[in-house]
C-alpha cells in the first residue's frame, strides 16, 4: 500500500486534461459482453476500477488489449457466466455485468459486490428490474443467481427508489433489455450523462434506445448487436474536483481541458455563488479564486442536481470559507466519514443525520489522516493543499480507484505531493 505526503502552501496555476469518465467506462466495458464482434473503447481512464473490470471480462473469456487509454475487447466466446468473488469484491460497479450476461446467456452468477463503505447501497432495484424482464433471481452464499428460462421479454419497469433513481440499475436493465423480445419501458430511470453515454454506445452497436437522459427510457429489443468504436465522455467528478482545487488554491486561475461544461452546471453554479470566477468554452472551464469568498448551502440530488460524489470536496472548500455552510447528502446520508479526519486538521464540522454544518476556519494544520472512500480521499488531498505543514494521507488506494494519476496532475499545476510506500 501507498500514502501521499501533501506539502501545504503551494499555489496552483496552468491547465489540466480531464480523463474519461470512470463511472461511464465501467458499464460501457461490461456492455462489450453483448456482442461477439470487436469493440474499441477510447479514453478509458487508467484507474484500478477499470482494471478490475477488464480482469472480470477476461475471466469470463473476453480477449482484451489495452494501450494508451484505448481498450480493444472481443467477446466471441464466453467460457463462463460467473463473475467470481475474488474480483467482484473489489468494486461495487462490477454488478453491472449481470445485465449483459443475462442477455447473452439467459443466466448469470455474480457475487455480491464490494467497493466503498459509504452506507447501504443494495442491488434490490437491479434485481427487481431484471425480474421484470422475466429473470428469476435468488441470493445464496453471497452470490446472485439469475436465470431467464424462457428468455428475456420486454415490459414496463419502475426503477425509482427511496433515494431516487439508480444509475447502475438503469444501466443493467437497459443492457439486458436491448436483446429482450419486445419493447421495454424503464420508468424512474436515472438521467445521468453516464447513462446517456452507455445508450449512445449501445445504439451505435445496433440497439434501439430512445429517451436516455430522461426519466423514461424506451428500448425496442433486437436480435443481436455488432461491434463499435466509442469514446467515453469526460469525467465530470474529476473535473469538479479540480474546479474545487482551483477555488481553494489557484494563484491566478487554472484551466480544465477536455470537459463538457453542461455536465458540470450544478457544480459551477455553486462555485460562482461562492464568489469564484468561472469561464466556459466549448470543451474547457477556467476558475479563479473568489476575492471575498462566501459559503453556501447545498443538498445532493440525482442529476441534474448537485452530485453526491462532489459533497466531500465541497466540504474541504467550505472548511476554509468564512461563515457557515451547510451540506446535506440525501443520496448517501452516511457519506461524511471525511469529516472526522478533516477535524483532525482543524476543521470545524458538525455532522448529524446526513447534514454537515461547517464553520469556516482561517487555517488548517497538517495531521496524519486516513482515506475511507474514493471521494473522501480527494477531499483530504484538497485540504492538505492549504494546510500548514505536511499532511500524510494513508490508504490512497481509494483515490486510485477513480482518479487517473491525480497526484501527477496536481504536481503539474504546482502542488507539492509525494507518493511513498505506506511504511516509508
Image (cartoon, rainbow, N blue to C red):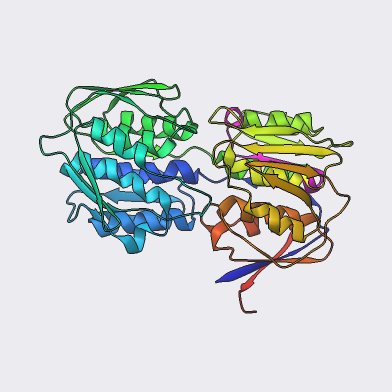
Say whether residue 291 is left or right of residue 244.
right
Position in image of residue 139 (x %, y %)? 26, 50
Q: Report x, y in % for residue 418.
A: 68, 68
Quadrant, the C terminus: bottom right
**Does 220 appear in magenta?**
no
Q: Which residues are magenta?
A: 248-263
Answer yes or no: is residue 78 visible.
yes
Can you say whether 61 is above or below 300 in the image? below
* Residue 106 vertical placement versus 1 (above, below): above
Q: Is residue 252 magenta?
A: yes
Q: Which residue: 51% across, 44% down?
A: 20
Q: Position of residue 202 (x, y in %)?
A: 32, 32
Query: In the depicted view, which residue is nearer to us: 15 or 221?
Result: 221
**Looking at the image, is 119 positioned above or below residue 260?**
below
Quadrant of the snapshot with the N terminus = bottom right
Residue positioned 58% across, 47% down in the render: 334
At horizontal 42% and vertical 59% (from top left) the residue drawn is 90
Amino acid at each position: 500500500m501507498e500514502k501521499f505526503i501533501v506539502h501545504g502552501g503551494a499555489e496552483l496555476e496552468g491547465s489540466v486534461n480531464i480523463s474519461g469518465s470512470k463511472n461511464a467506462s465501467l458499464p460501457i466495458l461490461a456492455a462489450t459482453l453483448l456482442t461477439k464482434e470487436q469493440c474499441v473503447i477510447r479514453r478509458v481512464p487508467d484507474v484500478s476500477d477499470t482494471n478490475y473490470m477488464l480482469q472480470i471480462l477476461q475471466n469470463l473469456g473476453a480477449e482484451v488489449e489495452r494501450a494508451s487509454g484505448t481498450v480493444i475487447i472481443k467477446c466471441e466466446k464466453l467460457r463462463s457466466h460467473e463473475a467470481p468473488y475474488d474480483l467482484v469484491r473489489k468494486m461495487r460497479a462490477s454488478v453491472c455485468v449481470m445485465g449483459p450476461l443475462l442477455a447473452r446467456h439467459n443466466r448469470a452468477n455474480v457475487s455480491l459486490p464490494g467497493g466503498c463503505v459509504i452506507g447501504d447501497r443494495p442491488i434490490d432495484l437491479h434485481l427487481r428490474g431484471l425480474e421484470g424482464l422475466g429473470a428469476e433471481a435468488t441470493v445464496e452464499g453471497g452470490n446472485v443467481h439469475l436465470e431467464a428460462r424462457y428468455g428475456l421479454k420486454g415490459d414496463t419497469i419502475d426503477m425509482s427508489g427511496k433515494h431516487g433513481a439508480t444509475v447502475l440499475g438503469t444501466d443493467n436493465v437497459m443492457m439486458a433489455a436491448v436483446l429482450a423480445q419486445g419493447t421495454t419501458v424503464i420508468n424512474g430511470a436515472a438521467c445521468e450523462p453516464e447513462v446517456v453515454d452507455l445508450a449512445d454506445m449501445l445504439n451505435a452497436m445496433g440497439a434501439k434506445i430512445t429517451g436516455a437522459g430522461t426519466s423514461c427510457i424506451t428500448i425496442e429489443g433486437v436480435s443481436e448487436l455488432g461491434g463499435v468504436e466509442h469514446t467515453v465522455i469526460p469525467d465530470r467528478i474529476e473535473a469538479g474536483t479540480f474546479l474545487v482545487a482551483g477555488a481553494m488554491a489557484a494563484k491566478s486561475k487554472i484551466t480544465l481541458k477536455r470537459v463538457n461544461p453542461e455536465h458540470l452546471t450544478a457544480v459551477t453554479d455553486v462555485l460562482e455563488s461562492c464568489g469564484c470566477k468561472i469561464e466556459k468554452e466549448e470543451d474547457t472551464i477556467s476558475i479563479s479564486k473568489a476575492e471575498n469568498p462566501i459559503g453556501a448551502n447545498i443538498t445532493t440530488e440525482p442529476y441534474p442536481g448537485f452530485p453526491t460524489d462532489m459533497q466531500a470536496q465541497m466540504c474541504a472548500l467550505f472548511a476554509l470559507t468564512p461563515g457557515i455552510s451547510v451540506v446535506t447528502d440525501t443520496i448517501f446520508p452516511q457519506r461524511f466519514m471525511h469529516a472526522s479526519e478533516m477535524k483532525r486538521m482543524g476543521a470545524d464540522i458538525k455532522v448529524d443525520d446526513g447534514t454537515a454544518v461547517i464553520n469556516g476556519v482561517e487555517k488548517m494544520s497538517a495531521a496524519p489522516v486516513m482515506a475511507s472512500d474514493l471521494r473522501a480521499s480527494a477531499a483530504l488531498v484538497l485540504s492538505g493543499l492549504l494546510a500548514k505543514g505536511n499532511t500524510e494521507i494513508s490508504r490512497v488506494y481509494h483515490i486510485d480507484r477513480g482518479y487517473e494519476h491525480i497526484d501527477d496532475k496536481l504536481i503539474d499545476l504546482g502542488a507539492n505531493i509525494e507518493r511513498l510506500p505506506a511504511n516509508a
